[in-house]
């Protein structure tokens, strides 16, 4: 639904935060672990290093809490005023209980209700959509949306086709009712369950409960058919973004920044090319972080916050497991 059709008003991002662990896993490190080279990884993915949360005692909640604390401290938010905390992740601390209530308690958001959302690399975008809808409906005034993933906990570091891509990190945004007419404008979200054969983690769910066999078969690590995922990602992110622009009467030249999910530099460049957007308008930090799944888009917003001006038009777009994908159009609401 277009924002102008909603009765409760428009939601706006009013603050951002982020966190990545100190420890780096470089391409040179990976050369010692699997049959790969720095040159192959750089040329095929654009990635130079990733951040890894090494401490086995620390999980996704640690990353999420750090990102939320960064946002809260930077903007002097009283956590008791937060109404809802949503954590988008595919690497929850536990299957049950969900991660968000723990995060909310740890940041002292005692008046919030909290839940997780699982839509893989599109999780943060889906989460923003849910939160923007809650604000538009007039139910809540301050919603924290966090994208966080400790991808290193589900990667097989002997599988060179996946271990080179993923890293750990978290990003957070605060959504509030817009006070200046700027904010969430429109969204186009889709999914296709046929994609689950091409990108999944099979073991430990209700279809294949954890067993000696699932362990032996390596079903507790992420599997992807990289080539197929690559093609779908480019096509769907570009199409979703173009549909949004067209139905809002905008052209490529009206967009100030494309904020694409960071899966592969070649996917990002091919998407921009398909959309006829110059790379100066396309935000990238994949070289330093790799693919942090639900965290890529909020980490971009965190890293490039200083570049945004009030009134800038941003298109956020993501593609991920499920398949899930989509795009959102928003007007940046603050300087
Ligand atoms: N180092 C060296 N060689 C590698 C390698 C590595 N790390 N990984 C794969 N190769 C080899 C393959 O075995 C293959 O060898 P072969 O031709 O002898 O069979 C060759 O490189 C080409 O493999 P291919 O899979 O065609 O490479 P690619 O250019 O498609 O790149 C990915 C692989 C995974 C980087 C790429 O497909 C990708 O990024 N896909 C999208 C992933 C994604 O977005 N996932 C998250 C969901 S959003």
Image (cartoon, rainbow, N blue to C red):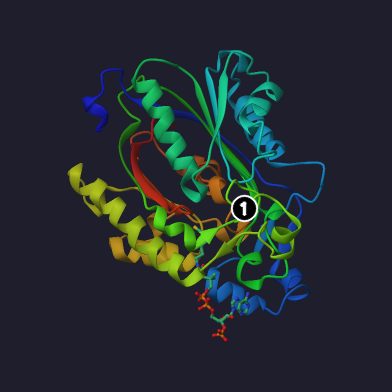
The residue at 64%/45% (across/down) is: 91
The residue at 69%/70% (across/down) is: 27
Query: CB of residue at label 1: within 8 Å of ligand 1?
Result: no
Image vertical order of residue 276 relative to residue 152, above or below: below
**Total numbered badges shown on the rendered structure:** 1
Quadrant of the image where one finds ligand 1: bottom right
Quarter location, residue 2: top left
Residue situated in front as seen by the camera: 28 or 150: 150
Q: Secondary structure at mark 1?
A: loop
Residue situated in front as seen by the camera: 84 or 283: 84
Image vertical order of residue 2 relative to residue 274, above or below: above
Residue 329 shown left or right of residue 51 in the figure: left
Residue 324 point in image, percent of width and height: 42, 50
Quarter location, residue 239: bottom left
Image vertical order of residue 214 relative to residue 296, above or below: below
Asked whether the viewer can see residue 258, the reply is no
Q: Quadrant of the C terminus?
A: top left
Q: Quadrant of the N terminus?
A: top left
The residue at 81%/47% (across/down) is: 56
Residue situated in front as seen by the camera: 132 or 161: 161
Residue 64 shown left or right of residue 267 in the figure: right
Residue 223 point in image, percent of width and height: 58, 63
Residue 143 shown left or right of residue 248 in the figure: right
Q: Residues within 10 Å of mark 1 (few under 14, many from 20)?
A: few
Residue 202 point in image, percent of width and height: 60, 56
Residue 243 point in image, percent of width and height: 24, 50
Asked whether the viewer can see residue 283, the reply is yes
Residue carrying label 1:
208
Image vertical order of residue 144 relative to residue 217, above or below: above
């Amino acid at each position: 639904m277009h924002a102008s059709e909603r009765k409760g008003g428009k939601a706006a991002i009013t603050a951002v935060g982020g966190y990545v662990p100190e420890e780096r896993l470089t391409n040179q490190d990976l050369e010692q672990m699997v049959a790969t080279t720095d040159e192959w990884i750089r040329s095929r993915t654009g990635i130079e290093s990733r951040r890894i949360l090494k401490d086995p005692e620390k999980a996704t909640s640690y990353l999420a809490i750090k990102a939320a604390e960064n946002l809260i401290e930077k903007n002097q938010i009283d956590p008791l005023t937060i109404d809802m905390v949503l954590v988008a992740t595919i690497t929850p601390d536990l299957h049950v209980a969900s991660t968000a209530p723990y995060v909310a308690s740890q940041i002292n958001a005692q008046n919030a209700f909290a839940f997780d959302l699982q839509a893989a690399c599109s999780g943060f975008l889906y989460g923003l959509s849910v939160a923007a809808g809650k604000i538009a409906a007039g139910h809540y005034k301050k919603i924290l949306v966090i994208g966080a993933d400790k991808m290193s906990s589900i990667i097989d570091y002997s599988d060179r086709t996946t271990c080179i891509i993923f890293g750990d990190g978290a990003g957070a945004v605060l959504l509030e009712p817009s006070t200046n007419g700027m904010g969430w404008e429109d969204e186009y979200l889709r999914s296709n369950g046929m994609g689950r054969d091409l990108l999944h983690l099979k073991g430990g769910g209700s279809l294949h409960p954890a067993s000696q066999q699932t362990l032996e078969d390596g079903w507790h690590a992420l599997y992807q058919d990289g080539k197929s995922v690559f093609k779908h990602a480019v096509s769907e992110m570009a199409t979703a973004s173009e549909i949004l622009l067209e139905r809002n009467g905008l052209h490529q030249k009206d967009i100030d920044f494309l904020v694409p999910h960071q899966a592969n530099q070649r996917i990002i460049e091919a998407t921009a090319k398909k959309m006829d957007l110059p790379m100066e308008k396309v935000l990238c930090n994949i070289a330093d972080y790799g693919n942090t799944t639900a965290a890529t888009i909020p980490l971009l917003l965190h890293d490039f916050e200083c570049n945004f001006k009030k009134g800038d038009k941003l298109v956020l777009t993501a593609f991920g497991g499920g398949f899930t994908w989509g795009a959102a159009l928003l007007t940046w609401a603050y300087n």
